[in-house]
Amino acid sequence: MSAQRITGFVLLALALVAPWFAYPVFLMTALCFALFACAFNLLLGYAGLMSFGHAMFFGMAAYFFGHTVKEWGWPP
């Protein structure tokens, strides 16, 4: 077995048992930020574009959700 395949299996096993050892909402938030960072790295690293267009959608969704929570009286 190659080292790359073993690393993949270890990461898969960690992903499957993570909800029992960490707070699931924290894991979801961390994965959202990781996806955001990967998109930014792809735009800046490979394409050479310095665009914050995708950040606008991320911030707009956060603002909309915060406003919704405030207006509807949901707990944070």
Image (cartoon, rainbow, N blue to C red):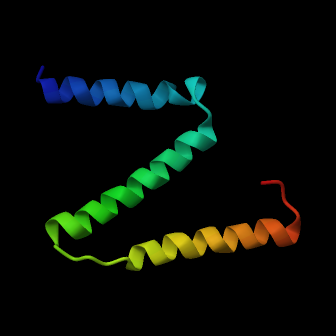
Task: For the N terminus, give its image quadrant.
Answer: top left
Q: Residue furthest right?
A: 73
Is residue 58 depicted above or below 41 in this figure? below
What residue lies at 62% left-to-right and 43% top-to-bottom? 25
Residue 61 x %, y %: 59, 71
What residue lies at 45% left-to-right and 54% top-to-bottom? 33
Task: For the C terminus, give its image quadrant.
Answer: bottom right
Q: Is residue 64 left or right of 37 when viewed as pictured?
A: right
Q: Residue furthest left?
A: 2
What residue lies at 24% left-to-right and 64% top-to-bottom? 42
Residue 40 x %, y %: 31, 64
Is residue 53 depicted above or below 45 in this figure? below
Is residue 12 depicted above or below 33 in this figure? above
Is residue 4 depicted above or below 71 in this figure? above
Residue 47 x %, y %: 16, 72
Q: Nearer the viewer, residue 52 or 22?
A: 52
Q: Is residue 73 left or right of 59 when viewed as pictured?
A: right
Q: Quadrant of residue 8?
A: top left
Residue 62 x %, y %: 61, 68
Q: Is residue 56 left or right of 24 when viewed as pictured?
A: left
Label total for image = 0
What residue lies at 57% left-to-right and 76% top-to-bottom? 60
